[in-house]
Image (spheres, rainbow, N blue to C red):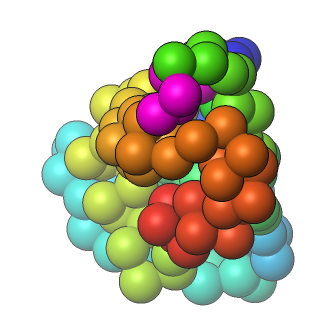
């Protein structure tokens, strides 16, 4: 599995006017939060926005996260009921919920590790209860358990 950290998802942005973050153009595929002196203040909608008064880029900071769907490849090795080791390759697609973009920016430390641990726990709890043939047939069951 490849590594995708939360810091690669969250970016620091700049306003439209050099040295001032008061006027911000937010692209359609991003969520931008405004910080006043390090504290989250509000989330900006796509389009041209007023973030607030800023002096030389010191008062207002901007953080953004992509709203696009992203994909994470997870590989889990586990043992089936009939003692056969198998590698399960899973592609997880995820995106940021617009209502919870501040949580995605400020609360998640390592998105890929959290998703990978969640998927691995589900696969390791389901596959050992199945024969290898049942595991190949149970793709939909695994998929619905993960989503």
Vertical relation: 78 (above or below) 132: above
Q: Residue at x 58, y 42 (%)?
A: 131
Looking at the rendering, which quadrant does residue 24 occupy?
A: bottom right
Q: Is residue 67 visible?
A: no
Name the residue nearer the viewer: 69 or 93: 93
State the extent of the magenta-drawn residues as a range: 75-82
Q: Is residue 40 left or right of residue 146?
A: left
Q: Is residue 59 left or right of residue 51?
A: left
**Considering only vertical position in the picture, is 69 above or below 81?**
below
Q: Is residue 144 located in the magenta-colored stretch of the structure?
A: no
Question: In this image, 86 relative to 99: left or right?
Answer: right
- Front residue of 85 and 56: 85
Residue 13: x %, y % from top left? 62, 43
Res 40 quadrant in image = bottom left
Name the residue located 47 percent from the left edge and 33 percent from the top edge. 81
Magenta stretch contains residue 77:
yes
Q: Position of residue 48 (x, y in %)?
A: 72, 81
Between residue 19 and residue 85, name the one nearer to us: 85
- Residue 80 is left or right of residue 88, and the answer is left
User: Residue 10's x, y, as percent?
Assistant: 54, 40
Task: Name the residue rendered at 69%, 70% in the picture.
Answer: 140
Residue drawn at (58%, 69%) of the image: 141
Question: Is residue 79 shown above or below 53?
Answer: above
Numbered circles on residues, count = 0
- Residue 21 coordinates in the image, percent (x, y): 55, 53
Q: Would you say residue 46 is visible in this rendering?
A: yes
């Amino acid at each position: 599995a490849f590594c995708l950290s939360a810091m690669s998802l969250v970016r620091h942005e700049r306003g439209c006017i050099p040295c001032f973050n008061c006027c911000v153009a937010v692209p359609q595929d991003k969520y931008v939060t405004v910080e006043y002196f390090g504290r989250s203040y509000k989330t900006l909608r796509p389009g041209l926005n007023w973030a607030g008064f800023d002096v030389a880029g010191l008062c207002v900071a901007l953080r953004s996260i992509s709203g696009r769907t992203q994909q994470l490849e997870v590989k889990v090795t586990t043992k089936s009921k009939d003692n056969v080791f198998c590698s399960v390759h899973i592609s997880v697609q995820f995106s940021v919920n617009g209502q919870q973009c501040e949580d995605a920016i400020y609360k998640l430390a390592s998105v890929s590790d959290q998703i990978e641990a969640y998927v691995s726990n589900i696969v390791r709890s389901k596959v050992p209860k199945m024969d290898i043939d049942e595991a190949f047939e149970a793709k939909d069951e695994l998929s619905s358990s993960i989503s």
